[in-house]
Image (cartoon, rainbow, N blue to C red):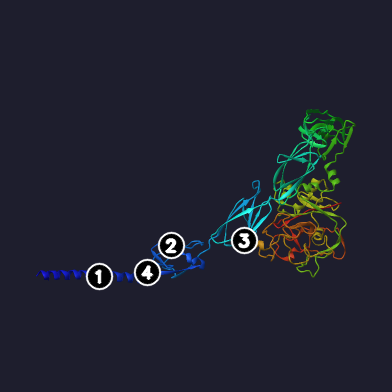
Amino acid sequence: MQIDDRIKQAQRRGAGIYLLGAVFTFFVFAAVLSWLFLVKAYVLNIGPTEALPSATIKVDSGSAYVANHKVYTLGGTVNISVSAQTFETTSLAISNDSPSNIEVILQPSPAQIIGSIEVEGAALSGETSWYIENSLVQVGNNLNYSVAAGEYELSVNNPYYKPYTTTINAQRGERLEVAVKLEPVQGAISINTQPSGAEIFINNEMKGTSPLVVELSGGKYSLTSLLQGYQSIEDEIEVSSTAIRPERNYRLLPVQSQLNISASPNDGVLLINKLEQPLGLHSLDANTSHSIEYRKPGYFPFKRSIKLAPQEQQSMSIALEPEIGRVWIASNVEADLSIDSKAQGKVGPDGRAFELMAKPLTIVLSKKGYRSVTQSVTASSARELKVEVKLLTEFDARRKEGRPLAANQLGIKLLKFNPDPFVMGSPPNETGRRRNEHQVKVDFTRSFWVSETEITQAQFAAFTGQASNSKLPQVEVTWDQAALFCNWLSVQEGLPPFYKVSGAKVTGFDTASTGYRLPTEAEWEWLAKKAKRSRSTVYVWGDQTRIPTNIGNFADESAKGNQLILLEQYNDGQAGLAPVASFKADRIGLFDLAGNASEWVHDFYTTALPDTQNVQTDYMGAPRGTQHVVKGGNYTSGRLRELRAAFREVGESAKPTIGFRIARYDN
C-alpha cells in the first residue's frame, strides 16, 4: 500500500512539471508572436562612408532597442542621436510615420585654427589683421577661427611688420595651431627744421641735430625738437609698411611774450600786425617788432609799434579821443530831420549846421505829402560837409520812377506792351467761329500797361473798405463797379481818372487820360493771340487743339458732377475758381487770360456791324451802348471754342464767372 501511495505522489509531481512547462512554452510563444507582429524595425543608412566605421546610435528618449544600425520600437516617438568621430552629431525623431529606411548624413566637424604671433625683441605693436582666402576673419594678436576641412591661404598683416602668407591644410575636427613669425619693416624718418640745428629726440633719446635721417624699424615713435630761443615741438610719427620713409618739416616758432591790451571805448577794432584780434591777452613773438592799431568810427585812430623780450609780460591801455566834424544840412522845403533816429527839429532852404562825430550817420528828412529821403553822411574834422536834400511830392516821386506804386502796394504787378497792327475777330474758316466775331483791322499809337493777373478779392476789398486776404479773382461785379475801381486806383496814384462818373454810374471816359481803365477788346485780343508772335494764333497757347498741361482753369475732369459739358483729357485740379496765378503764365507773362474767370473789357457790346474795311487806330469799340463785351473762358467753359482768343460774349450784369483786370496808357 505504501508502494501505491508513492506511485500516486510521483504521478502528481510529474503532472505539475508538465503543466509548468506548458505554461512557460505558451508565454515564450506569445512573446515571439508579439515581437513578430508588434515590434517595428527602422534601418539607418548612415553616411558619408568615412563616418560609418565609428558611427554610434544613442536612444535619447522613448522605448527602443538599437542593434546593427537598426532601431526597434514598439511604437510612439523615439528621439535618437547619431554620431561619429570627426563628424557633427545629428539628432532625429522616429515615429510611426517614419519610413523603414532612414538616411542619415553626418556633417564633418570643422577644423579649429589657432594662430599666434611671434616677434623678436620688443613686444608686438600695431593692430594685426588675419585673412583666410583674402577675407578678413579676425583682428587681434591671436586667431581662433573655425573652417571646413580643406586647403587655405592664411595671410597676416600688421602695419609695422612685413606681410606674411602661408598655406594650411585643415582636416575635419582638427585643432590646427599656427605660429606666425613676423619680421619688422625697416625704414627711416627724415626731419627738417627751419631754422636748422634743432636737437632731435626719438622716444626721449637724443639722435642728433636737424636736418637728420634716423633709421628705424616699424612702429610708433614720439619726437621732440629743441632749439634755444624757439618753442619746442612734440610730435608722434610712424614707420609702417605704407609709410616706410616718413618726412617731417617743422617751422620753429620763436619763444613767446605776453601783451595784455585794454581800450576805451571797448567796442572798437583792434589790429595786431594788420590782423583783427580781440582785446585781452595775446602771445607775441619775442624780439620782434609788432604794430598795434585800434580804431572806432567817430574817434581818432591809435597806432604804435612794440617789441618784447622773451617771456616778457606787458600791459597796454588805449584811450581813443573823439573826432568831431561840422555838417550843414538843408532842404528845398521845411521838413523834419532825424539823425540816427533822434529827432533834430526842422530844417529848410536856409539849412542848419550840426557838430557830429566822424562816423557814418543816417539822416532822414520827412514831410507829410512828400517822399521821405534817407541819406548816409560821415563828418570829418578836416572839413565841413554840406548836404542839400530835395524832397518830392509822392506824385512827383512816382512819376520820376515811372511805375505805378499804389498798384504795387496792393500786390498788382503791371507789364508794359508796345502793340503792333493785327486783325481782331476770327476768319470765316476758324473752327468754332461765331457770327459776332467780326474781323476789324486795328493799329496802335500808344503803349499801355496791363495787370499780370485778374484783380483779386483782397485787392478789390481795399477799394470797398472791407477786409479780405483772398487771392481768388473778384467776380460778381458789374462793369460799372470795375470801372469805379479803376478810377479809385488812379486817385491813389495821383493819375487823372479815365472814367467820367455821375453818382455810381459811368457816363463817359477821357481817352487822353493815363489813369487806370479796363483793357479795350482790341488790346485784350492782341495780348491773347498776337503779342510776341509772328502771326495771330487761335488760342492763348497757340493753334493746337490739345490743351497744354497746367495752362488754365476750365470745366474739365476735375469739375465732374458740377458741369454738364467738360473738356476731355484735361485736368486742372480745380472744380471752381482758383487763386490767381495758380497756373503757368503765358508767353508774355500774363496769367489766366484763357480761363479761371471771364473778364470785362472796356468796349460796349452792340449787334451793329463795325467798320471792317478801314484800319481802326487805338480802337475802343462802339461809341455807345448799354451792354459790354466779356472776353476769355472761365472755370465753367467746357467747349474748346469758348477758349479761343476771338470768342466774345455780351455782359449785362454781375456774374460768378466774370471778373476783370486793369490797364492804363503809358503816356
- Distance from label 3 to label 4 (Cα)? 50 Å
Q: Few, some or many C-alpha atoms within 10 Å of disc 4 (few <14, some 14-19, many ≥20)?
A: few
Q: Few, some or many C-alpha atoms within 10 Å of disc 2 (few <14, some 14-19, many ≥20)?
A: some
Q: Position of residue 240 (x, y in %)?
A: 71, 50
Task: Indicate whether 576 appears above or below 463.
Answer: below
Judged by depth in the image, the label closer to the viewer, 4 or 2, is: 2
Q: Is residue 7 left or right of residue 667?
A: left
Q: Is residue 49 left or right of residue 254?
A: left
Task: Indicate whether 526 appears above or below 404.
Answer: below
Residue lying furthest right: 383
Label 3 vs 2, first from the N-terminus: 2
Q: Few, some or many C-alpha atoms within 10 Å of disc 3 (few <14, some 14-19, many ≥20)?
A: some
Label 2 vs 1, first from the N-terminus: 1
User: Label 3: which residue?
Assistant: 152
User: Label 4: which residue?
Assistant: 39
Residues at marks 3 and 2 touching, judged by CB atoms closer than 8 Å: no
